[in-house]
Amino acid sequence: MKKLALLLVLLAGSFLTGCGVVDSGGDRMRRVGQINDIQARMAVDDWDYFWLYERDSRLTEWHSRVGY
């Protein structure tokens, strides 16, 4: 009976914890670097549009999605 109770407690605990984060520290740093790079390029586009008095556009030469 004790083994069954222990098994149920362990089984319930495994369902409550769920899956862990699979990204490593290097993966997170690479993703943050990519996001910062994209945002910096978009800021340069916005700055150029402001000073060159170009009309607003949602199009950009920089892709906001990374290919993988």
Image: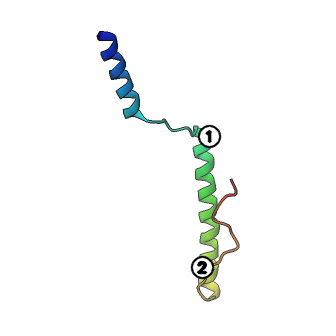
Query: In which quadrant of the rendered view does residue 34 lie?
Result: bottom right
Q: For residue 14, which numbered disc appears in the image?
A: none
Three-letter code, disc 2: Arg
Q: Residue at x 65, y 86 (%)?
A: 52
Q: Is residue 67 above or below residue 5?
A: below
Local crowd size for mark 1, using a 10 Å CA cut-off: few (<14), some (14–19), many (≥20):
few
Q: For residue 58, which numbered disc appears in the image?
A: 2
Q: Residue at x 34, y 11 (%)?
A: 3
Quadrant housing the N terminus: top left
Query: Disc 1 designates what residue?
Result: 26
Q: How is the image coloured?
A: rainbow
Q: Is residue 60 above or below residue 14?
A: below
Query: In which quadrant of the rendered view does residue 58 lie?
Result: bottom right
Q: Where does residue 32 sit, x and y in percent of width and height?
A: 58, 51
How many numbered discs sit on the rendered protein?
Answer: 2
Point out the residue furthest to the top here: 2
Q: Residue at x 57, y 45 (%)?
A: 28
Q: Judging from the image, what secondary structure is the residue with disc 2 in?
A: loop
Q: Is residue 49 above or below residue 43?
A: below
Q: Judging from the image, what secondary structure is the residue with disc 1 in?
A: helix
Q: CA distance from mark 2 to mark 1?
A: 32 Å
Three-letter code, disc 1: Gly
Q: Where does residue 40 sit, x and y in percent of width and height?
A: 61, 65
Q: Nearer the viewer, mark 2 or mark 1?
A: 2
Query: In which quadrant of the rendered view does residue 27 lie?
Result: top right
Q: Where does residue 54 sit, x and y in percent of width and height?
A: 63, 88
Q: Residue at x 51, y 38 (%)?
A: 21
Q: Where does residue 60 sit, x and y in percent of width and height?
A: 66, 75
